[in-house]
Amino acid sequence: MRMIRTAAAQLGPIQWADTRQAVVRRMMDLMDEAKAADADLIVYPELALTTFFPRWYYENRADADEWFEREMPGPVTRALFERAAQHGMAMSFGFAELTPEGRHFNTSILVDRSGAIVGKYHKVHLPGHDEYDPARTFQHLEKRYFETGDLGFPVWRMLDGIIGMCICNDRRWPETYRVMGLQGVEMVVLGFNTPSVNSQKSEEGLAQRMFHHKLSLQAGAYQNSTWVIAVAKAGVEDGHHLMGGTCIVNPDGEIVAELEGETDGVIIHPCDLDATRFGKETIFDFQRHRRVEHYGRITAQTGVTPPPD
Ligand code: CDV
């Protein structure tokens, strides 16, 4: 068995006025809790260090740069890396990245047991819009503040397994998992900030959004025979409610661990990477069963082309 004791470390809300130092302290508390339970890997949410700032409109985009990290680790996050290395624990978390070239990405990283960054992912499926939208009950301006990810969906060998990352809205897209599945992924780690209501459809509330969230994770896990670790930032943040739903899904698509509530908290599950083998070698043996000659449209077009009338 190749076992990764995996900690899904949900964060409760992070308010506008909360400092990065305070958030890192909360993350270290969760890390200590995970260490006490002998975790090998800890996974935190998308944009783990700050409030979900894309809900706010800045006329001048550069004014939003205060939410971005210019180095990783930086002066504040270094303590988290040091604590992880002390514990010999690998980790993954999301943050807003401003590169030395002035590019902005919604980023997540994979850090090995020694505290070295081994993988970086830039969010590909950015939801929302890039101009102020008065028709929405609240804004979702990821397309204003971030560039579309430029790194694809790589996977990395770490902890004796093959691990990939995606971020929040990416989890709703089958292509996300399949591109990693084609590289043999055994565990997908992801963080999310999902409002509990739809800003464009008020009747779509928490129950339906939670259903779509789990449906996406479970389908992605099953159809690629991989573990999926999904971690929320949850609770009422700057007056806006983010849903929870932190959970761990096995390669059969079953939820095997789930965190209740909307505060800081950890769930731990022993994830056996060898449990991915059966699905990968039978019904989802891609080499034998995929029919790429029929899949051309998937990469040839984005929008829908209906048949002629
Ligand atoms: N942060 C996100 O990507 N949120 C989206 C919302 C906008 C639907 C999500 O997929 O949860």
Image: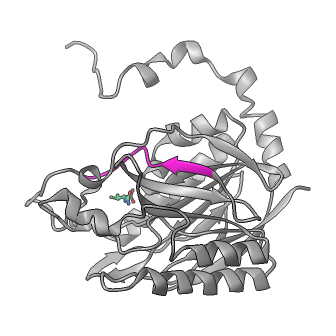
Is residue 210 visible in this depiction of the protein? yes
Residue at x 62% of width, y 39% of height: 180
Q: How far across and down, in percent of the image, does residue 15 sit?
A: 34, 83
Q: In which quarter of the image is the N terminus?
A: bottom right
On screen, 304 above or below 276? above
Decide: is 8 above or below 126.
Answer: below
Q: Residue at x 58, y 47 (%)?
A: 220
Closest to the observer, 275 or 169:
169
Residue 206, position as x, y percentages in the image = 36, 71
Secondary structure character of the magenta stretch overall = loop
Q: Is residue 107 left or right of residue 156?
A: left
**For ligand 1, which image quadrant applies?**
bottom left
User: In this view of the protein, which residue sits in the foreground, 249 or 111?
Assistant: 111
- Where does the image place residue 297, in percent across and percent down from the top left? 43, 19
Question: Residue 273 appears at what percent x and percent y?
Answer: 81, 53
Q: Give the range drawn in magenta.
A: 119-128
How many numbered marks, from 0 up?
Answer: 0
Q: Is residue 80 on the magenta stretch?
A: no
- Left or right? Give the position of 215 relative to 199: right
